[in-house]
Image (tube, grey):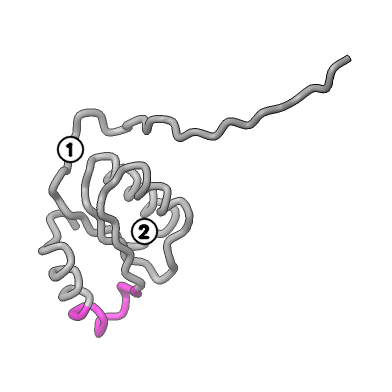
């Protein structure tokens, strides 16, 4: 009897949209606590709707975030910040304005 072989074929399947024809193309959104959990779920849906996204979180982005950027081709920028720290917010606001030109959805 001949040898049995198993093959693993890797490919990226087309992204199935959960937002249908809804579009936020050209809009910039702000999501806090975005590196995991509910915040990250929001990031995925906003990316599917073609929104650019400013992520705020005290922990860094993980591999799933990199995949979201790759899958959807939108501008996603992580800002390591603690939104409870009021002294940091004016500087953060200036960074967001210079990078995105403003935030449309908060």
Gap in angstroms between the C-alphas marked 2 and 1 = 20 Å
- Left or right of 4: which side holds 106? left
Which x, y percent locates residue 59? 44, 68
Residue ranking furthest to the front: 2
Relative vertical location of residue 79 with respect to residue 21 in this rendering, above or below? below
Residue ranking furthest to the top: 1
| Residue in the image at 44% along x and 31% along y | 13
- Left or right of 105: which side holds 84? right
Q: Is residue 90 magenta?
A: yes
Q: Earlier in the sequence, mark 2 or mark 1?
A: 1
Q: Which residues are magenta?
A: 81-91
Name the foreground residue: 40 vs 7.
7
Q: What residue would you read off at disc 2?
A: 34
Which x, y percent locates residue 3? 83, 22
Which quadrant is the N terminus positioned in? top right
Describe the element under mark 1 as helix, strand or loop.
Answer: loop
Describe the element under mark 2 as helix, strand or loop.
Answer: loop
Name the foreground residue: 53 vs 34.
53
Locate residue 9: give its quadrant: top right
The crowd level at tag 1 (other Cα within 10 Å; few <14, some 14-19, many 20+) is some
Which x, y percent locates residue 105? 16, 54
Q: What residue would you read off at disc 1?
A: 23
| Residue in the image at 19% along x and 73% along y | 95
- Tag in front: 2 or 1: 1
């Amino acid at each position: 009897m001949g040898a049995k072989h198993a093959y693993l074929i890797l490919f990226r399947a087309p992204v199935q949209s959960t937002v249908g024809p809804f579009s936020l193309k050209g809009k910039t959104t702000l999501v806090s606590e975005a590196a995991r959990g509910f915040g990250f779920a929001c990031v995925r849906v906003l990316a599917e709707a073609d929104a650019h996204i400013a992520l705020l979180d005290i922990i860094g982005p993980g591999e799933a975030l990199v995949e979201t950027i790759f899958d959807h081709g939108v501008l996603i920028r992580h800002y390591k910040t603690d939104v409870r720290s009021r002294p940091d917010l004016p500087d953060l606001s200036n960074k967001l304005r210079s990078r995105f030109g403003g935030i449309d959805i908060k």
